Image (cartoon, helix red, strand yellow):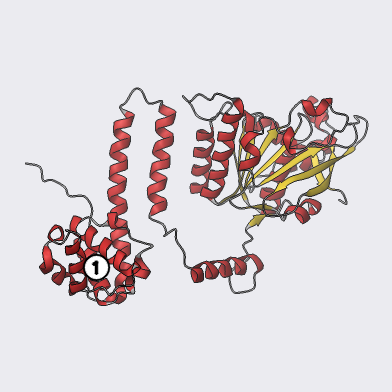
Amino acid sequence: MDQVKLPPHDRGAEAALLGSVFSHNEVIDQVAGIVKPADFYVAGYQEIYRGQCAMRSAGLPIDVVTLSAWLKDRGLLENVGGYDSLSELWGAAPSAANARQYAEIVRAKAGLRKLIHVCNDLIREAYDPSVPPAEALERAQRDVFEVVSAGCRATVKSQQEAVDEFARDLDRRCGTGDGEVDAPYVPTMWDDLDDLIIGLHRRELIVVAARPSLGKTMLAVNLIRQVAGSQGIGTFMASLEQSTGELIHRLVCQRAQVHGMRLRRGELEQDERARILDAFDMSGWPVWYDDTPGQSVTQVASAARLCKAQHRIGLILVDYLQLVDAAAGRRYERRAEEVGHVAKALKNLARELDVPVVALAQLNRELEKRAEKEPVLADLKESGDIEQAADTVMLLWKREEPDDLSEVDIISVKVAKQRNGPTGQAHLAHRKRYFEITSLLT
């Protein structure tokens, strides 16, 4: 007969943790953010820990006598094994100084049990023909990530813990201590724009919108050069509109300073060929692309998570927002609702992966009918929840009508929304023949 396997648990660690609380009541303040009552495998221990937490919150002393009275008043004493069971716990902790370690063991075992539960649910769902495969895979990834994240750290911080964390972040940001300088933002390296937005901030969704052919994708490609090429920051780009070949074409033109149309036609001089060969050397750039068309936001998020897990990704680019499907198998009454769902999902992805997500977007055609061409937030196509989800919204436009004969146009970047900073405008130079965007003074 096969031996029945019990779910992962450590009865000794659970007992030691409860015993530590009996001997030193303040222990519960240290472990309450780590362990919840449901994390205990022994049902009686769940009630004991719940009672200890409740008594601590009420400012009551916790020992075997007081807790047994508290449980008895609520008809729970016999459920936990009576007074004798409580007495056994009194001496179950070798040292209350190790209470945090006991709590970590209890939480880790609870995480394994949760993982088993999630996997069993996923197996049942995988066999259910009524569940769309993409939806099942998304739920699988999300649920497993939730289990992993829950085991990483407590979500509640004390005031001093929050201050200490900020101090460490300031140390990394400014290099004022012994730690490495690690800014919480990615500089664009365009001085005029960085002065206004102070770079692309982690955990934020930055929407960059414009009418077609006004520089959205070109700005993204230039960001790859500025961020990955110049700073060595890992970058992932989901390109739903243009192929990887088209993106590399623009990067090569920028690096080789070769006219884009000459490269496209293959009409190159010997020195241009040499510069292009040199420009091909981008092997050290930490960039990863996914140019699969028609992706859902689930697929984009899955690819980004995988890239983040395998590489050090510091920036995610999505080109462009309105081309991303919300979710396979789900219907929306309005297109704006679907696009809003995508924007919210990308914002959640930025928070989950602790990186800035730059999503390109379209502006409405109504803008072209106005005498005043300067865009406003309402010009966002299917704007609805995009504006609400985004931390920063930048609108690209050109004050002057594009002139095919001019070598340089001025792109105005209107920061129409910045949750943690001012609005305003920055100005960049567009060197058209090379698909290059530079600071005006470059």
**In the picture shown, does residue 86 fall above or below 308?**
below
- Residue 373: x and y, percent? 85, 33
| x and y percentages locating residue 303 in the rendered image | 51, 38
Residue that label 1 marks: 18
Q: Residue at x 31, y 40 (%)?
A: 119
Residue 392 percent coordinates (x, y): 68, 46
Residue 326 in percent (x, y) is at: 54, 30
Residue name at image x 76 percent, y 39 percent: 395
Using residue 376 as the reference point, say whether residue 163 is left or right of it.
Answer: left
275 vs 42: above or below = above
Residue 10 seen from this side: no
287 shown above or below 16 = above
Looking at this view, is 284 or 33 the one in front?
Answer: 33
Residue most extreme to the front: 73
Q: Is 440 located above or below residue 318 in the figure?
A: below
Q: Does the rendering let one see residue 398?
A: yes
Please identify the quarter of the rendering in which residue 100 is found.
bottom left
Find the residue positioned furthest to the right: 405
- Residue sitting nearer the eye, 373 or 176: 373
The residue shown at (19%, 55%) is 43
For this rendering, which residue is in front, 173 or 114? 114
Q: Quadrant of residue 258?
A: top right
Of the residues shown, which amino acid type is indicated by label 1? Leu
Quadrant housing the N terminus: top left
Q: Residues within 10 Å of mark 1 (few under 14, many from 20)?
A: many
Q: Residue at x 32, y 68 (%)?
A: 101
Q: Of helix, strand and loop, which one carries label 1?
A: helix
User: Residue reaching furthest left?
Assistant: 1
